[in-house]
Amino acid sequence: MSRSLLDSDPLSVINVGVEAFTRSVRDAGGHALHVDWQPPGDGDPDLAWMLAQLASDDDDADCVGARIDRANALAVERIVAAQPMLIDVAPHARDVWPDMERTLLHAGAPIAWERMCGPMQGSMIGALLYEGWAETPQAAEAMLARGDIRFAQCHDLGAVGPMSGIISPSMPVFVVRNATPFRIECVLSVDGLDVIDGKDASFDGDALKRREAN
């Protein structure tokens, strides 16, 4: 003898897909749980297959997902085992990297000036004022837009900067060494620029005042 699911009292439904389907169940006094789901890759078979390949496979140690999992596990292991030791405070970043010249370091991957977010652009402008390469924020922005200043990534030089990661040649930096077998030296910026938005910032924060005092 069969029994209709609709005869259940109270009616309880798990809905997958279109959320509007839950409304009729609730209107009828039933309980509906919506599962926010959509086909992998937005229904694109090729994209879905690419995503599937990122999953680990216990039967295939050489698949992309398995290799990613091993790399992530190794990264976490090294982070947890790290023993950072402060070994120096360099008065200027150029003391660590003598070839910096007119280079600004920033966080993240390579990026063009016009694609930078407001805080990163603002910190870049502040760095030019800090260095004395420009007299006004407007002049600094023009120099950056023309490509007068070279950009480089913090991680390529083993550096870490606060927020958007801006480090300029005259900024003081901590020099830190990892005491574990994975001996990695890391340079951390000592002094942030107190800049939060390139369009509205006044660029008169404590960092610039200390730079002028020195």
Image: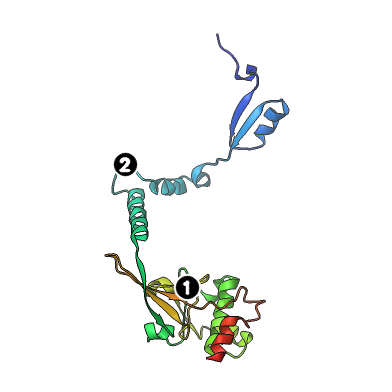
Q: In the drawing, does residue 162 fall left or right of residue 9? A: left
Q: Estimate the x, y position of residue 158 in percent, counting from the top left.
A: 38, 73
Seen at 55% across and 41% down, the residue is: 38
Q: Earlier in the sequence, mark 1 or mark 2?
A: 2
> Can residue 207 be seen here?
yes
Residue placed under numbered mark 1 in the picture: 161
Q: Secondary structure at mark 2?
A: loop
Q: How is the image coloured?
A: rainbow
| Viewer-side residue, 139 vs 205 | 205
Above or below for 167 versus 81: below
The image quarter containing residue 88 is bottom left
> Can residue 97 be seen here?
no
The image quarter containing residue 195 is bottom right
The reply to whether dot 1 and dot 2 touch (C-beta < 8 Å) is: no
Residue placed under numbered mark 2 in the picture: 58
Seen at 48% across and 77% down, the residue is: 190
Q: Residues within 10 Å of mark 1 (few under 14, many from 20)?
A: many
Q: In the drawing, does residue 40 fall left or right of residue 31? A: left
Q: Estimate the x, y position of residue 44 in percent, counting from the top left.
A: 49, 46
In the picture, the quarter occupied by the N terminus is top right
Residue lying at the far right in this picture: please name it.
27
Residue type for callout 2 = Asp
Q: Secondary structure at mark 1?
A: loop
